[in-house]
Amino acid sequence: METLERILAEHPFFEGLDPRHLKAIEDCATNVRFKPDEYIFREGEEANWFYLIRQGQVALEVFHLEQGSIIIQTLGPGDVLGWSWLIPPYRWRFDARALEHVRAFALDGRCLRTKCDESPELGYALLKRFAMVLEQRLQATRLQLLDLYSVRR
């Protein structure tokens, strides 16, 4: 039988994390499901969760007045969705919409912020992992901008 701790430990985001920290994180985790076209969160809403996608695809979108919703990145199994829970004022910066049935772990940001305050070692371990997520998102955005603004000859 698979335990939540074991499943979390096998997720790429938590690979190599100290088992003590994994146990603390497990206390903040729950299974969630989203239906196709269901919004997981909307820009500007309070951000107190992040998600480890286990199955399905999620679109990160921004809204443009003339063009409507624009997909800026698509995330899938093994990806992390959401970092705004970590940075005040804890508001989502994008919309996230399920493109198909999505299964994920939702991790309570309030719970984790409390645990990180109690254990700076855990906080630092999570911050290093989220810095990598932010770097990946910045690189994806950079590539899209290069494609969008490339000079066509």
Image (cartoon, helix red, strand yellow):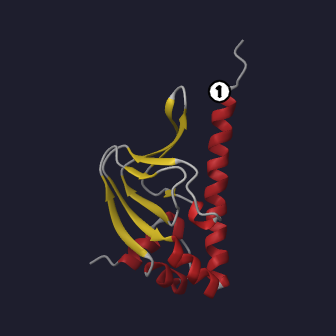
Residue 102 horizontal side relative to residue 80, left or right: left
Front one among 90 and 131: 90
The answer to whether 150 appears left or right of 78 in the picture is right
Q: Which residue occupies the extreme top position in the image?
A: 153
What amino acid type is highlighted by mark number 1?
Leu
Residue 28, picture quadrant: bottom left
Whether residue 8 is situated above or below residue 89 in the rendered picture:
below
Q: Quadrant of the C terminus?
A: top right
Q: Residue 101 placed where, x, y %?
A: 30, 50
Residue 134 lies, in percent from the top left, at 64, 55
Q: Residue at x 63, y 34 (%)?
A: 144
Q: Residue sitting at 46 percent across and 66 percent down?
A: 11
Q: Residues within 10 Å of mark 1 (few under 14, many from 20)?
A: few
Percent coordinates x, y for residue 107 in the rendering: 46, 70
The quarter of the image holding the N terminus is bottom left
**Relative depth, front residue between 2 and 38:** 38
Q: Position of residue 135 (x, y in %)?
A: 67, 53
Q: Secondary structure at mark 1?
A: helix
- For the point 52% across and 61% down, the residue is 46
Q: Could you say which is closer to the camera, residue 107 or residue 16?
A: 107
Q: Residue at x 46, y 49 (%)?
A: 96
Please tell me how many numbered marks the rendered image carries: 1
According to the picture, the residue beneath numbered tag 1 turns out to be: 148
